[in-house]
Amino acid sequence: MNVENLTSVTEFILVGLSSQRKTQLLLFVAILLTYSLTIMGNLAVILLVRFDTHLQTPMYYFLMHLSGLEICYVTSTEPQMLAHLLVGNGVISYTRCATQLFGYLSFGAAECFLLVVMAYDRYLAICQPLLYPVVMDMWRQMHLASSCWATGFLGGAIYVGCTFRHSYCGPNHINHFVCEMPLVLKLACDDTHITQTVIFVVAGLGILTTIFVILTFYVVILLSVLQIRSASGWRKAFSTCASHLMVVTLFYGTVIFLYLIPRSATSSDRDKNIALLYVVVTPFLNPIIYTLRNKNVHEAVARVLRRGGFEPKAL
């Protein structure tokens, strides 16, 4: 590749999910509703953890950061999707495409590492209960959470730098509803083979390493739980891990399918459907998964309602 970037493309055109106007409007309504509920659900989790003293524990502190990441993640992609669906035009500027790519890659990478931290937190709480309050003090919580955010931003900056160091001077249609990195790279006018290989190897190692660490923590947790003789102890241990495991499965299942499984030339529509699950549905489901059967959250909601003058029925 030449040292000088000869990019002449000033905008890209996102093909989107459908070219049918009626379908676009239906998708606009559905995604707008999902986006609004995602913001409200995750914001409710943040406010509950922030203002209810009973939820100010390491597990809920990290859950608060996860909700913050989800809000940032969907905001980096969905408003642009909604604008394109509303006007029926998928034009996005070169700068905005780079910004969107940086946003969702950064927040996605940060979530990847935060899920590891949350697994580590559950490991300490269940397997090292006497050391847990000492090891997972407030300073350690802040250090771990800030490290996840910083690592995510660093990863996003590296990926965007690798992607947009190439020249873009020809076709500018992206068969997707967001600026997806592999599809953007395909439009480059120069050779991207080395860049694609490096990105694939680095991303693959990062994803597989974090999965391995999470699974290792949960294998140790399982072995520890099997030594508990009381049924109540089993239920308590599994109840604190089940929601996290569901979120991990949703997150990594879609990530592996999108980025690690080789794509065929005819799989673009399938990839967009999977990406829609990853971009829109998963962030919407995460606060529901964490709160639906969480007794502590139910009690916190009841306390908030009582302070507001309401007397809720049994939650």
Image (cartoon, helix red, strand yellow):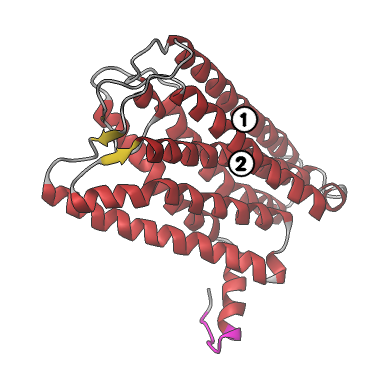
Give the structural element (helix, strand or loop) at label 1.
helix
Disc 2 residue type (three-letter): Leu
Q: Is 85 placed left or right of 7 in the picture?
A: left
Q: Are marks 1 and 2 in contact (CB under 8 Å)?
A: yes
- Determine which residue is flagged by label 1: 210
Give the structural element (helix, strand or loop) at label 2.
helix
Residue 89 x/y as whole percent: 20, 44
- Determine which residue is flagged by label 2: 115
Residue 112's image quarter?
A: top right
**How many badges with numbers are in the image?**
2
Q: Is residue 312 magenta?
A: yes
Give the main secondary structure of the magenta stretch.
loop
Work out whether residue 196 can be spotted: yes
Disc 1 residue type (three-letter): Thr
Q: Is 81 placed left or right of 66 in the picture?
A: left
Residues at marks 1 and 2, CA–CA distance in whole angstroms: 8 Å
Residue displayed at 38% across by 17% down: 262
Q: Can you say whether 79 is above or below 13 in the image? A: below
Residue displayed at 59% across by 38% down: 153
Residue 140 x/y as whole percent: 80, 48
Q: Is 207 placed left or right of 49 in the picture?
A: left
Residue 255 x/y as whole percent: 46, 32
Q: Which stretch is magenta? A: 306-313
| Label 2 Cα neighbours within 10 Å, binned few <14 / some 14-19 / many ≥20 | many
Judged from this view, the residue extending furthest toward the bottom is 309
Residue 14 x/y as whole percent: 26, 36
Q: Is residue 2 magenta?
A: no
Give the camera-side residue of 3 and 178. Answer: 3
